[in-house]
Image (spheres, rainbow, N blue to C red):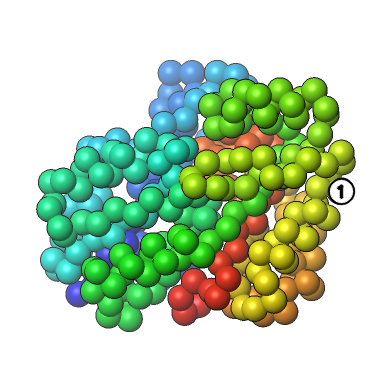
């Protein structure tokens, strides 16, 4: 058997790769009025980001414990590596840490320090290593190495959703509203911080491309572009990155899930890069 990799639904790793690499995905939750909807399992209305009655919740220790148990059984005892959304953005990592205590050293937990494919690329690197026969210690090291090399940048039309959900400071949100700016954010030590201030969406996209190209540094890189209700913007961004980055080892285009979409708001687009790549691409 092989080490099994577990993650949560925020990553939105392409479903074909989830199936191919045997990755187990634990759903996060969208709480709409009195209804608890499981991301990736239950149908979530597209209009969620436009209403103030929606909230989100991480996976519970009980849910994660069951997932780790199932994964450990599937691994034949080789072990489980769980990679979760930043502990600064969600309680899921801490819930996973609590759940892992039940399994001693057979379950290892990694904080991706990010979200979206900032979580997904360490998951893919770990799962590819596991499929190639790496043991739990090696898979853990590879996941953490990918976390260290990853960089995620994000454009949002407005900061209000992030402020309301407590994912960005009130001062930064007020500044963005007061200046009517179009902000570019960056994941730093697991938190979303303001990186650049621009006046228009077109200038923000131009700046985002420049920052990504600078971050890649001219070498090979894995790239992911994700969006929330902004497919045309994401497609254009992806096309520009293909032109500007000569050595893309793999590229993923997709949508953020409703959990992240609730906090980002419509129009958001983000890019995650891993200079050097994220293991062997499938």
Q: Residue at x 64, y 78 (%)?
A: 219
**Is label 1 in a helix, a strand or a loop?**
helix
Q: Vertically, is 269 above or below 128?
A: above
Q: Residue at x 53, y 51 (%)?
A: 116
Q: Vertically, is 201 above or below 141?
A: above
Location of residue 150 in the rendering, given as x and y in whole percent from the top left corner: 53, 61
Left or right of 29 in this view: 80: left
Q: Residue at x 48, y 45 (%)?
A: 190
Count of picture labels: 1
Location of residue 260 in the rendering, given as x and y in whole percent from the top left corner: 55, 40
Residue behind mark 1: 202
Q: Vertically, is 168 above or below 248?
A: above
Disc 1 packing (10 Å; few <14; some 14–19; many ≥20): few
For residue 15, say whether it is visible: no
Residue 95 vs residue 230, the one in the foreground: 95
Location of residue 252 in the rendering, given as x and y in whole percent from the top left corner: 60, 65
Residue 150 vs residue 62, the one in the foreground: 150
Left or right of 84 in this view: 194: right
Q: Residue at x 71, y 65 (%)?
A: 214
For residue 246, say whether it is visible: yes
Location of residue 124 in the rendering, given as x and y in whole percent from the top left corner: 44, 67
Q: Quadrant of the N terminus?
A: bottom left
Q: Quadrant of residue 201?
A: top right
């Amino acid at each position: 058997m092989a080490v099994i990799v577990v993650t949560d639904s925020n990553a939105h790793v392409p479903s074909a790769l989830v199936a191919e690499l045997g990755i187990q995905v634990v759903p996060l939750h969208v709480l709409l009025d009195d209804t608890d909807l499981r991301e990736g399992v239950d149908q979530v209305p597209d209009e969620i980001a436009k209403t103030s009655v929606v909230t989100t919740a991480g996976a519970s220790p009980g849910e994660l414990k069951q997932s780790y148990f199932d994964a450990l059984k599937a691994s034949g005892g080789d072990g489980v590596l769980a990679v979760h959304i930043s502990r600064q953005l969600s309680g899921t990592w801490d819930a996973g840490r609590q759940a892992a205590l039940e399994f001693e050293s057979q379950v290892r937990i990694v904080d991706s320090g990010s979200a979206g494919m900032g979580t997904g690329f360490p998951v893919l690197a770990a799962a590819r290593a596991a499929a190639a026969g790496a043991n739990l210690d090696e898979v853990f090291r590879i996941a953490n190495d990918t976390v260290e090399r990853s960089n995620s940048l994000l454009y949002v039309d407005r900061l209000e959703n992030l402020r309301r959900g407590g994912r960005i400071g009130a001062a930064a949100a007020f500044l963005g509203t007061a200046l009517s700016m179009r902000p570019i954010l960056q994941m730093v030590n697991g938190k979303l911080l303001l990186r650049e201030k621009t006046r228009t969406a077109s200038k923000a996209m131009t700046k985002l491309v420049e920052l990504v190209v600078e971050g890649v540094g001219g070498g090979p890189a894995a790239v992911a572009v994700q969006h929330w209700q902004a497919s045309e913007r994401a497609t254009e961004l992806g096309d520009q990155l293909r032109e500007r980055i000569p050595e893309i080892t793999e590229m993923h285009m997709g949508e953020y899930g409703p959990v992240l979409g609730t906090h980002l708001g419509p129009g958001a687009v983000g890019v995650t890069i891993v200079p050097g790549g994220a293991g062997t691409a499938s």
